[in-house]
Amino acid sequence: MREELKHWSSGNWHVTEGKADDFIDAWTEFLAWTKGANEGFVKARLIRDVSDPNHFVSFAAWRSPEAAAAWQGRPEFADLFGKCRALCDDMTSGIYESTVTL
């Protein structure tokens, strides 16, 4: 039986005009580190808004909210997240819990 994914981190990224390719590269680097260095990480996805190619939403599944919080507390997080954030005009993020699964 597959593990139900209950714990998520998510980001809503509004990338600076002309920086989308750089952002995708930086996010990929960030998540490669996340995957390799954080035991509680399950998987992640980056999606792009069809009507606004500078708008992205990221989702990452975690085994627990504590694992996601520990990830955010690591020194590498600040550096790699900061590289992504620096390419954006606006960005919001949070740690979430599933409430309905269909």
Image: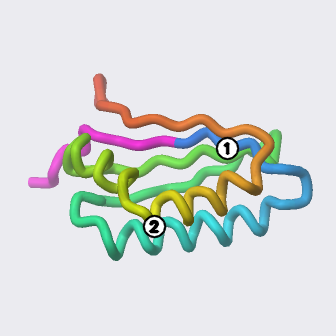
Distance, label 1 to label 2, CA atoms, is 20 Å
Q: Residue at coordinates 46% horizontally, 60% vertically from top-left?
A: 77
* Mark earlier in primary sequence (1, 2): 1
Amino acid type of the residue that numbered disc 2 sits on in the rendered structure: Glu
Q: Is residue 100 above or below residue 35?
A: above
Q: Is residue 65 above or below residue 46?
A: above
Dot 1, crowdedness within 10 Å: few (<14), some or many (≥20)?
many
- The residue most toward the top is 99
* Magenta span includes 19: no
* Magenta span includes 6: yes
Secondary element under disc 2, as helix, strand or loop, is helix
Tell me the quarter of the image containing the N terminus: bottom left
Amino acid type of the residue that numbered disc 1 sits on in the rendered structure: Trp
Q: Residue at coordinates 71% horizontally, 62% vertically from top-left?
A: 23
Q: Quadrant of residue 11?
A: top right
Residue 24 position, x and y percent, is 68, 65
The part of the chain drawn in magenta is 1-10
Residue 19 position, x and y percent, is 83, 60
Dot 2, crowdedness within 10 Å: few (<14), some or many (≥20)?
some
Q: Quadrant of residue 64?
A: top left
Q: Please name the residue that numbered disc 2 is placed on.
A: 76
Q: Please name the residue that numbered disc 1 is placed on.
A: 13
Q: Residue at coordinates 30% horizontally, 24% vertically from top-left?
A: 100
Q: Is residue 56 above or below residue 20?
A: above
Front: mark 1 or 2: 2
Secondary element under disc 1, as helix, strand or loop, is strand
Residue 10 position, x and y percent, is 48, 41
- The residue most toward the front is 75
Tell me the quarter of the image containing the C terminus: top left
Q: Is residue 29 above or below residue 63?
A: below
Asked whether the beta carbons under mark 1 and mark 2 sit within 8 Å of each other, the answer is: no
Q: Main secondary structure of the magenta part?
A: loop
